[in-house]
Amino acid sequence: MNDIEKAAAFLKKTSVRGIVTGLSRIEELLQKMGDPQEKVPVIHVSGTNGKGSFGAMLTTILKCAGYRTGGFSSPALTGLTDSFRVNCDETAEEKLAGIILNIADIWKTMTDKPTEFEVLTAAAYEVFVREKCDIAVVECGLGGDLDSTNVISAPLLSVITNIQRDHCGILGSTLEEIAAHKAGIIKPGRPVYYGGSAALDVIRTAAEKNSSELYLPETASFRLISDNELTGTRFTYKGRELLLALLGTYQFTNAVNALSCAEILNGLGLDIPFNAVQRGLAEVRWHGRFELMRKKPVVISDGAHNPDGIRQAAESIRKYFGGRKVALLIGVMADKEYTLYPELLGELTDRVFAVTPDNPRSLESTKLAGVFSERGIPAEAFPELSEGVRSAYDYSKRTDTPLIALGSLYMYRQFTEVLSKLK
C-alpha cells in the first residue's frame, strides 16, 4: 500500500464519527502541529450559498495579482486533492498524503479523536505553510462558529456571502438563528464583509460586539449587461466592462462580492490592480456551478440543493433556455427540503431522472421521483446513478432537450465519469 492509499484508508477510519460539533479537537490537533493556521494570512468565508464560486473568483484574482494563493473548499468534487489548491492548481497527491499521514500519527495519540473534516482542515492549513502561500481563502464546511475552519484568531478578512435556509437541523430554523452561527467567524478588531441582506441586524450586532468594521456591497458600482449567454456573464464595474467565465444568473452576485472584497483588501494594504481583476474573472474555473459540460446536446451540472439554490438554478434555466423545457437529472441528501422541488422546477421540466448519490445520507431515488410524479411531472427512479445518467443523456440526445444535473455535489465525480464515456 502506497502513501496515498494509506492516507485514504486513514481518512475512511476518521469518517466513522460523522459530523461532531465543537472546536476542542481541531484546536488540540493544530496546537500539536505548531498552529499552522496562524502562519498564513487567511480570508475566511462563510454563508449559505456562493462560497465556492466566490472563493474561486477571489483566489484567481489574487493569483493574477501576483500572490501565491491557497484555497480550501468542500466537498471535494473530483477527488481528495480537489479541496486543496495552490494558485488554483490541486495539491500534488504525494505531498497531501505525506501531510495526512503525519496528522495520523498525532491523531493516534489523542483521546478525543478528530473527525474526518477536522483532519482535512488541519491538512489545509499545513499545505498553505509548506507551500509558502502569501494568502489563503478558506471556506467553512458548515455554519461558522463551530466549524472546524474557525480557528484563526485574526483573519485578514471575514466574509459572509449570504444567509438562507439550509442545514436547519443543525443551524436553526430561522434566518436569525442561522445568521448567528455564520457570524461566529467574525473576530475582534478584524473587518467583515456581508454580501446578503437577510438578518442584517444579527450580522451588524456581531460586528459591533467585536469592534469589527462591517462592509456591505457597493452595488451602485456594478451594472449587469448579460447573464443569459453560454459564453459567460458580462457586466460593468465602475464603468469598465468585464467578462466572467462562470455561468449562472447567481454568478453576477458572487462577482459583486468578490470584487467588493478585492477593494477591501486593497484598503488593507494588498495590491490588486484592475488588470488582475479582469484576468482573474476571465480565467476562473469552478466545477459543478451551472457548468457547461457539453454543447450538443447541452449538458449542464449545477450543485443546487437547498431551496434558495434551486430557485437560482430555476432562474438560470429560464434565462438561458427561455420557454424551452429541460430534462432534470437530480439526486440529493435526505435532509434537504426536496418536497419543494416540484413547485420550484415543475414548469421548467419535461422529464425527471431521479438518482441516489453514492453517500450514506442520500435520499432514495424512488422518494424523490415520487414527489414529482405526484405533481403530474413524468419521473423515473434509478437506484444506480450511472444508469440514471445514461438514460437521461440518451433522452436528451434523442429529443434534443437540454439536460440539467442538479442536486448534491457528492454525485459530481461519478456523473462526470459516466458522461465522459458516453458518445
Image (cartoon, rainbow, N blue to C red):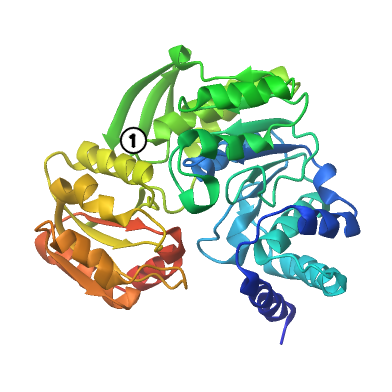
Q: Nearer the viewer, residue 165 or 290?
A: 165
Q: Position of residue 408 (x, y in %)?
A: 41, 59
**Amino acid under disc 1:** Thr
Q: Position of residue 219 (x, y in %)?
A: 45, 16
Residue 372 image-quadrant placement: bottom left
Residue at x 58% of width, y 59% of height: 82
- Is residue 90 among the parts visible in the rendering? yes
Q: Position of residue 332 (x, y in %)?
A: 37, 61
The residue that label 1 is drawn on is: 249
Count all numbered tags in the image, as a single digit. 1
Q: Position of residue 87 (x, y in %)?
A: 66, 46
Residue situated furthest bottom in the rendering: 1
Residue at x 83% of width, y 75% of height: 108
The answer to whether 230 is drawn above or below residue 414 in the figure is above
Q: Nearer the viewer, residue 155 or 414?
A: 155
224 sits left or right of 187 in the view = left
Question: Which quadrant of the rendered structure holds the C terminus?
Answer: bottom left
378 sits left or right of 77 in the view = left
- Is residue 272 among the parts visible in the rendering? no
Instruction: Please tell me how crowded label 1 is: few (under 14), some (14-19), or many (20+) other residues with Cα within 10 Å.
Output: many
Asked which secondary structure carries label 1, the reply is loop
Q: Nearer the viewer, residue 124 or 366?
A: 366
Question: Which quadrant of the rendered structure holds the N terminus?
Answer: bottom right
The answer to whether 169 is drawn above or below residue 317 in the figure is below
The answer to whether 52 is drawn above or below residue 155 in the figure is below
Residue at x 42% of width, y 63% of height: 412
The answer to whether 279 is drawn above or below residue 376 in the figure is above
